[in-house]
Image (cartoon, rainbow, N blue to C red):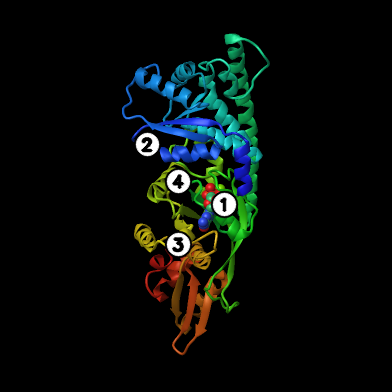
Amino acid sequence: MNLINLEDEENKKIRSLLIGEPKNDITELEGLVKTLGYEICRSVILNRIEQNPVYGIGSGKAQEISALAKELEIEIIIFDFEISPRKQRNWEKLVKIPVIDRQEVILRIFASRAQTKEAVLQVQLAQLEYARPRLAHSYGDMARQRGGNFGSKGSGETQLELDSRKIREKIQQLKKQLAQVVRDRETQRKRREKIPLPSCALAGYTNAGKSSLLNALTGADVFVEDKLFATLDPTTRKLQLKSSIKTSENEKGFSTNILLTDTVGFISNLPHALVNAFKSTLEEAQRANLILLVLDSSDEKIESQYFTVTKVLEEIGAEKTPSLIILNKIDKLQDNPARMAKLSELFPDAVKISAKTHEGFENLSEQICEQLLGKEISCTIPFENQNLLNEVRKTGIITEEIWLDDAVHIKLKGGELKKNPRLAALIAPFTEGNINENSK
Ligand code: GDP
Ligand code: MG
């Protein structure tokens, strides 16, 4: 940690000025900009946005911001709301420094974090699609910075036209490469699906601790750092879970292997180009048997985190996938029982853990088992129904079998039974309580 801070002091940080509006909480943008490594010199909240066609805000206000930028020696202005390519050009003309918006901040973060081939291609594509309409409106040299360096030196409009054509070609080329990567991933997935292990996907707001949790649970070497978006690529690991459910073979309980996949962090208003670009990555969440929805319990805005994540899950069609809410970082709340109680009230079914201290891991493991395998179902099979008992035995879902004077008492993996409706119907008359209720 200290090393990083020292380095930061040496490498002068880019001085930024943030412009927000009252309806959006600027702290999210501040977090994103810090993640990029920029210094935030000032955040200005505009009280009233006049729809001036030149700057999107009143020109008097624009002049004020320009003067403030000069005074504070600002090197980049960042808007928390989208600005059109034309307005962006007008701003850059006025302030003579780069002016970007939230979307570009996110794109830059993704670009700096992309690690696998797929992520690199996805980010490049999203960046170019974002840059294309902006290129023609870029001011002077800033065209070059936007969307990378295309072609050699040239001048004025002709160069821009050339760049624009090159961007189009490059986009086509990237799309082709990406399609191949997606096909490869599909093949990998099919291979993985042949091994019938239940799968869990870690989903959650960026910085909630997903990668730390994957690391802590599996010892996997996933990139972890105290910044947003430390992970871009889905990383799948095999994880052994111990359950206290006892089987006839193992008195001490059995262990189950599951696949656990890390996903990209979810943030509110993810730029559309990125949602598209990361579709295949986000699909991991959609295809999972269980989504582990990780929340940072030390974050004051935990409810909006939760809201953001569920909204993105809906957008990718994963709203029906069962999920387990995990309240992470509870080590930070040791001295705050009031907040702990409040969280229990807000998320009564959540599992409280700390990826740092491993507190709550046992319970987490139990809960995952229960969600994936279903609750145990108890049945009492009369001796004369030996055939039924034999049939159940063949499926291997019996976790306990006790012969008593009155009948055979067995316990079954509820989740497995649910997958076999015929058997479930046969066994229903001998079940205590309702099967579906029990195995939900
Ligand atoms: P991700 O973006 O969801 O993958 O989050 P990371 O796993 O990269 O974690 C973000 C930051 O939170 C890192 O600095 C972690 O060290 C920290 N962190 C993660 N889990 C815990 C935890 O249980 N307790 C504490 N105190 N910090 C944590
Ligand atoms: Mg991560």
Residue 164: quadrant of the picture: top right
Whether residue 121 sits left or right of residue 336 in the image: it is right
Label 4 packing within 10 angstroms: few (<14), some (14-19), many (20+): many
Q: What secondary structure is found at the residue carrying circle 3?
A: strand
Residue with the mark numbered 4: 313
Which residue appears at 58% of the width and 13% of the height?
Answer: 161
Indicate if the residue with disc 3 has its beta carbon within 8 Å of ligand 1: no
Amino acid type assigned to the residue bearing label 4 in the image? Leu
Residue with the mark numbered 3: 351
Mark 2–mark 1 Cα distance, whole angstroms, equals 28 Å
Which one is earlier in the sequence, the residue at label 4 or at label 3? Answer: 4
Residue with the mark numbered 1: 211
Mark 4–mark 2 Cα distance, whole angstroms, equals 21 Å
Indicate if the residue with disc 1 has its beta carbon within 8 Å of ligand 2: yes
Indicate if the residue with disc 2 has its beta carbon within 8 Å of ligand 1: no
Choose mark 4 or mark 3, whichever is in front: 3
Looking at the image, residue 206 lies above or below residue 242: above
Q: What secondary structure is found at the residue carrying circle 2?
A: loop
Amino acid type assigned to the residue bearing label 2 in the image? Asn
